[in-house]
Image (cartoon, rainbow, N blue to C red):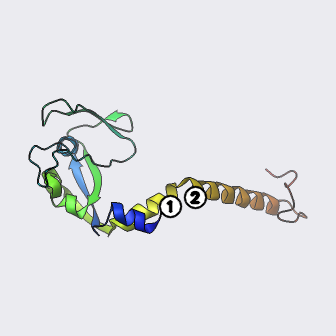
Amino acid sequence: MTFGEAFTVQPFGNLLVTMDLTGAQVEQVLEQQAVPGRPGGRDILILGISRGLRFNYCAGCAFGARVDAVTLNGIPVNPLTTYRVTVNSFLADGGDAFTVLTQGTNRLGGGDDLAAFTTYLTANSPSHRRRRTASTRSRRRHRRAQLVPGRSVGRGPATGAP
């Protein structure tokens, strides 16, 4: 993926905002993915969520009753527990009718969302993972070779290395 393609998906230049929300507020934000009469004419806007956050979504259920069974890393989200959440500044200020996010506390500003997105894409691209794995293997071989006196680095496996 090119920078231009990433910019096409996320062109707004928002900053990241990290905040505290209760579990009840997290569930309310998830419910706000479906809002009748949302400005812009799109009643349903599904958020991108973090790995580990799971929930059931019933598209045929009434507005405000579409989300249940919210879990984080397999553990039910407790309505009274505080969770750290990161969103872009547009959403943090209630944009697209995600008004619950305006209630977040302990807000901390972050970097540019497009930069974070491209960094994520680079770190998680299949070719980057292959290069990183090969590079890690090479470094391990190099370290093993250095642990064995009298062996040249990079001339095959180091005999007797741990």
State the residue in front, 51 or 145.
51
> Which residue is at a point 18% across and 54% down the rendered structure image?
101
> Which residue is at a point 20% across and 59% down the rendered structure image?
92
Q: Quadrant of residue 134?
A: bottom right
Labels 1 and 2: the sequence-earlier one: 1
Circles 1 and 2 in contact, beta carbons < 8 Å: yes
State the residue in front, 9 or 55.
9
> Which residue is at a point 77% across and 57% down the rendered structure image?
141
In this rendering, position of residue 146 left or right of residue 60: right
Which disc number belongs to residue 122? 1
> Which residue is at a point 17% across and 42% down the rendered structure image?
34
Q: Amino acid at mark 2?
A: His
State the residue in front, 78 or 103.
103
Which disc number belongs to residue 128? 2
Q: Amino acid at mark 1?
A: Thr
* Up-down relation of residue 27 to residue 105 (above or below): above
